[in-house]
Image (tube, rainbow, N blue to C red):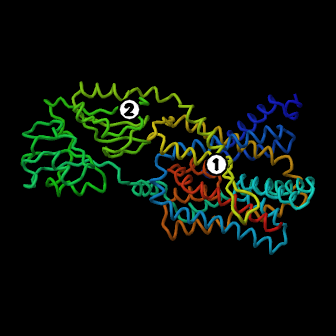
Amino acid sequence: MIKLFTQGGTAGAILVLALVIASGLYLGRFKFKGISLGTTWILFMGILLGHLGLRINPTMLSFIKDFGLILFVFAIGLQVGPGFFRSFKKDGLPMNLLAIGLVLLAVATTFIIHLITGEDLGIMTGIMSAAVTNTPGLGAAQQTLVDATIATGGSPESAAAASAGIASAYAVAYPLGVLGAIAVVILSKSVFKVDLEKEKEKSERGEESDSKAFRLACRVENPAVFGKSLHEIIGTVNSEHLVISRMMRDGKVSVPDMDIPLEEGDKLLIVTDVHHKGKVPIIFGEECVVDMNEWITPDSKLINKRLSITKSAITGSSLRKLDIRQKYGVTVTRILRSGVQLQADPDIILQVGDSIQVVGMEDSIDQLAKLVGNAPETLQKPNLVPIFFGIALGVLVGMIPIRFPWMPQPLKLGLAGGPLIVAILLGHFGPKLRITTYTALSANLMIREIGISLFMAAVGLGAGETFVSSLLGGGYIWILYGLIITLLPMTIISFVARAVLKMDFFKVCGLLSGGTTDPALLSFSEQLYGGKIAVNYATVYPLTMFLRVVAAQVLIMIIL
């Protein structure tokens, strides 16, 4: 039985992984003063059991670590892809500038420690990669060092020994790199006295985009529109953002015919967005209080219903192209996507997983339901084809060499950056290309949790074998160096983001998680605080990943 845990076969590897993950997740359920380390416990259980002799074949362990990381970042990319570019337009520039500052501060801190202490810069590069939990940076540094050592006449053995030294420094500094990053987030919440409920309200207010839906009513009092049709009025003022949901004339409520002339005293129920609602009283007349009971009369045959887009053929079609009002006599008033209500702009692209709020006659709505599918139960089945094709494409993108004339080795986005970028692009452009990328939230969370669990377990088991020996051999000072590299830049950037730029707490958490390329910190922050941290993480992650890899290679080339 003992051999099963130590010989490194497939059955033993599965058994060890399951034991590490299960025990780590169990410990993650316990809280101290309301705080839990969550999945980070998997890392520490991996270190402990690795130290006690549990082993997995190194090749298999490397595969598990990389595949787990790919699953985690790809699931994040699919989730945040639909809103990624919108959030980038709003907050991307300041957040990415802060992320660049985070990278530069870490490099500067690393180099200053090297100058003051005389510690080998290669070892310091490994410590820096661990301090910001950037495994691709470690791999890039090792590969650069090995290739350059051999190219300059060094032996393969000396190159391997130097590479192993970097890995040992990484393994020793990594655990407290994770803990240090978590500590900065916890302390930031405490120092700035963050009220999570108020932060959520602030975050939601800040997310009021051009497509956020609002409902309002008005009375037709503007003489300029008397006798004109709605179609003519909206065309004249160039405002297709106004969706006329219902019209009341002489106490009767109906879905308005766009060609019927308006009369003084008509009342309109309108859905529009935050930037166009001010046009309504200017165009039509006095705004009224919305009382939905007023719009539901006993003799009215209109119903209000929500339909689910479940037919893949609808993906990529716009409301204008479907021409629902003309063909079915039904008005689409709002679109629900990923928990956010959007205004029914004619050019908005529909996708599987959307829900549309409609008003019309019951028979007409039933016909429309057949067009869009309206079978929510089918959404529970994951679309695996685009997921695995996306992962394959992401791996290829991550392996593309990016050459710079002043660097002897090309840069690569790696197995984390490539899949994340492809997943974001799939999530955003997939519907426009008629690619169904919808994944139920529960399925997405399952993929993410499995991915981060495999990644943390593999890192812990890999570090556990040499963790204690490295500490006893003088590596304990590496922990201090790593903590400085973790705490100093993150503290400075979190202060600037919160105190100077007044970012909400969830943006700060996403910035710090993405700026340190730290999936453990992202997982911890989401579990403990909630909020849309993953969107902010993905906003800065691609650029940060690239810069972290570049920084590691540049530091190695300084010593060659």
Is residue 296 visible in the rendered structure shown here? yes
Residue beneath the point at 85% across and 45% down:
51
Q: Earlier in the sequence, mark 1 or mark 2?
A: 1
Q: Of residues 163 and 471, which is closer to you in this image?
A: 163
Residue beneath the point at 37% across and 36% down:
355
Residue extending farthest to the front is: 405
Q: How many marks?
A: 2
Instruction: Give the spatial CA distance, label 1 vs label 2.
Output: 38 Å
Vertical placement of residue 248 versus 222, above or below: above
Vertical placement of residue 114 versus 261, above or below: below
Where residue 10 sits: x, y (%)? 80, 30
Residue beneath the point at 38% across and 27% down:
373
- Image quarter of the N terminus: top right
416 to the left or right of 77 = right
Please, what secondary structure does the residue beneath circle 2 have? strand
Q: Which residue is mark 2?
A: 308
Is residue 182 visible in the rendered structure shown here? no
Q: Amino acid at mark 1?
A: Ser
391 to the left or right of 200 = right
Q: Amino acid at mark 2?
A: Ser
Contact (CB < 8 A) between labels 1 and 2? no
Q: Of residues 335 and 345, which is closer to you in this image?
A: 345
- Label ID, residue 36: 1
Where residue 370 sits: x, y (%)? 34, 25
Q: Mark 2 packing: few (<14 Cα in 10 Å), some, or many (20+)?
A: many
- Image quarter of the C terminus: bottom right
Where residue 177 sits: x, y (%)? 72, 57
For discs 1 and 2, the disc positioned in front in the rendered view: 2
Where residue 236 sits: x, y (%)? 18, 53
Residue beneath the point at 65% across and 53% down:
518
